[in-house]
């Protein structure tokens, strides 16, 4: 069967069920001059919506750009940065939120660029949500904070969807999710990490031969299917342990034969045993 003739799976839900998008709007108003942002203490990133006007952006990694609003600016990881109005005498409306995607354990966070800037007219789906968000941000209606936070979460999900559908990445996880065959294999790995996945099974899900699948996966994702699955399982294990789940239950859920097997793999990968994560979660 031709891979493209089959319906595409939901490529994001499996990830978002494991690593929820959470946003907290902390600023909405006009800026004139400079506004500095430190990296969020909890390991999150920042989402900015820029209204009509021009702002310059500079970050601690040396990134520099100028944004013409209305536009969206997204830093998925904790990166200190600065917004500056280009014409210091002209104010620009901005809405700023901290966004949490599960930190570096979430493969989507690792796959995203340091910063993404996009004019709102590039995506009607984003533009529609942004219009409602600005309306809420500069009004004073009851429930405003809850609405703003939820709308920012929707914006992030739609931004991820846009990046996948537009093939914005040439390689890595987002490129894999944009590939019809690889997307099917990645989706089943994300949704059912505890199953026994062999190269043959995954190739069948992808609608490819074993050799073609292995080579395509490595070329697009940048690693082998087995290595990707191992790291995905360990990332999930760390998240579940941080939620105070018992080691035995976590091992079973992510596909390890025993708690001891998970503990050995976990310690090799993270440089600390699972009990260290448990202690931090309960302290």
Image: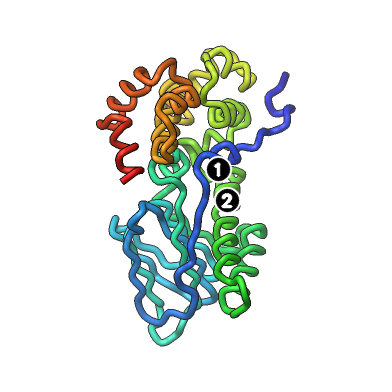
Q: Position of residue 205 (x, y in %)?
A: 62, 20
Which color mode does the image show? rainbow
Q: Is residue 195 above or below residue 136?
A: above
Within-10-Å neighbours for mark 1: few <14, some 14–19, many 20+:
some
Q: Position of residue 45 (x, y in %)?
A: 41, 56
- Residue that appears at 33% across and 22% down: 265
Q: Which label number is shown at residue 16?
A: 1
- Residue that appears at 46% across and 48% down: 101
Does residue 116 appear to the left or right of 145 in the view shown?
A: left
Q: Position of residue 83 (x, y in %)?
A: 38, 70
- Residues tagged 1 and 2 counted as in contact (Cβ below 8 A): yes
Q: Is residue 231 above or below residue 75?
A: above
**Element class at badge 1:** helix
In the figure, residue 75 lies in which quadrant? bottom left
State the residue position of label 2.
157
Q: Is residue 152 above or below residue 279?
A: below
- Residue that appears at 40% across and 77% down: 86
Within-10-Å neighbours for mark 2: few <14, some 14–19, many 20+:
some
Image quarter of the N terminus? top right
Gap in Å between the C-alphas at discs 1 and 2? 9 Å
- Report the number of discs: 2
- Between 283 and 154, the one nearer to me in the picture: 283
Q: Position of residue 28 (x, y in %)?
A: 49, 74
* Extreme residue in the left direction: 271
Does residue 137 appear to the left or right of 241 in the view shown?
A: right
Q: Is residue 3 above or below residue 53?
A: above
Q: Which of disc 2 and disc 1 is earlier in sequence?
A: 1
Give the number of the mark in front: 1 or 2: 1
- Between 80 and 27, the one nearer to me in the picture: 27
- Between 168 and 275, the one nearer to me in the picture: 275
């Amino acid at each position: 069967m031709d891979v493209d003739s089959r319906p595409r799976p939901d490529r994001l839900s499996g990830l978002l069920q494991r690593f929820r998008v959470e946003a907290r709007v902390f600023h909405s108003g006009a800026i004139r001059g400079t506004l500095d942002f430190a990296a969020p203490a909890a390991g999150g990133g920042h989402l900015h919506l820029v209204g009509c006007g021009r702002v310059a952006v500079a970050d601690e990694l040396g990134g520099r750009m100028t944004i013409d609003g209305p536009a969206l600016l997204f830093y998925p990881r904790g990166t200190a940065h600065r917004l500056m109005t280009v014409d210091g005498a002209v104010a620009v409306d901005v809405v700023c939120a901290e966004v949490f995607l599960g930190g570096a354990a979430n493969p989507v966070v690792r796959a995203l660029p340091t910063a993404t800037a996009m004019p709102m007219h590039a995506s009607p789906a984003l533009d529609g949500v942004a219009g409602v968000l600005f309306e809420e941000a500069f009004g004073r209606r009851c429930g405003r904070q809850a609405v703003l936070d939820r709308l920012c979460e929707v914006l992030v999900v739609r931004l991820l969807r846009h990046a996948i559908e537009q093939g914005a990445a040439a390689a890595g996880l987002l490129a894999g999710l944009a590939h019809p065959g690889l997307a099917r294999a990645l989706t089943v790995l994300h949704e059912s990490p505890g199953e026994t996945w062999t190269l043959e099974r995954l190739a069948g899900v992808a609608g490819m031969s074993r050799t073609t699948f292995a080579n395509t996966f490595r070329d697009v994702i940048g690693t082998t299917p087995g290595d990707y699955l191992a790291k995905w399982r360990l990332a999930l294990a760390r998240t579940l342990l941080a939620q105070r789940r018992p080691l035995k239950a976590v091992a079973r859920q992510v596909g390890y034969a025993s708690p001891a097997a998970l503990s050995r793999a976990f310690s090799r990968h993270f440089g600390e045993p699972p009990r260290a994560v448990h202690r931090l979660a309960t302290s």
